[in-house]
Amino acid sequence: SRVMATSPVFEGDTIILYCSEAKGFVFSQPPCSSYSHITIFPVPAPQSSAYLKDPAFPNIHFASFQVLPENSNIDLECYSPLGLPVRNQKTFSRSLVYGRKIKLLHVASKKYLSIRPLETGNPIAYLSEKDDDSSLFRILPIRIGKLRGEDVHSEDTVKLECVAEKGH
């Protein structure tokens, strides 16, 4: 996934995720009444950085995720990912670093990005109301030269490893 956000990335920031393997952005929207299905919003010309910097989403909220610390306890009934001045809050003031565990809250549905294994062995991504290990990810560097503890910057290519499903 590629993190597209303001540089450097902080806990509490709202980001969009680009999947280079699928050549598109992680996206979820109605008509799925439960908002639980994840799909890919394709990029017409992934080799063109213009499409990556300014994708033509019908609604950006369906592709946006808020980065939350692993130990955040949020009442999703009362919470608005877009309504909080997050950087002013003590719990959301740390910059995002490689090796840190995070949760990704989908802005439109207020559900967590999660991974579930399938019988075929391949995992599936979905949105869940549950705040458990399936929605907890460790940010790992893809490139040589990036080390655990270093800041994640905008447009860094990262691997999100699900804590519940090591290697996925």
Image (cartoon, rainbow, N blue to C red):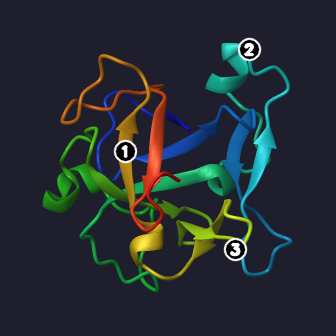
Q: Residues within 10 Å of mark 2 (few under 14, many from 20)?
A: few
Circle on res. 36: 3
Q: Position of residue 143 (x, y in %)?
A: 41, 21
Amino acid type at image mark 2: Gln
- In-image side of 106 versus 12 (left or right): right
Circle on res. 47: 2
Amino acid type at image mark 1: Ile
Q: Residues within 10 Å of mark 3 (few under 14, many from 20)?
A: many
- Residue at horizontal 42%, vertical 76%? 79
Residue 9, quarter of picture: top left
Residue 86 visible in the snapshot: yes
- Residue at horizontal 77%, vertical 35%? 56
Amino acid type at image mark 3: Ser
Circle on res. 139: 1
Q: Position of residue 133 (x, y in %)?
A: 40, 73
Compared to 126, does 131 lie above or below?
Answer: below
As measured in the structure, the alpha-carbon distance from the residue carrying label 3 to the one carrying label 1 is 23 Å
Mark sitting earlier along the chain (3/1):
3
Residue 80 visible in the snapshot: no
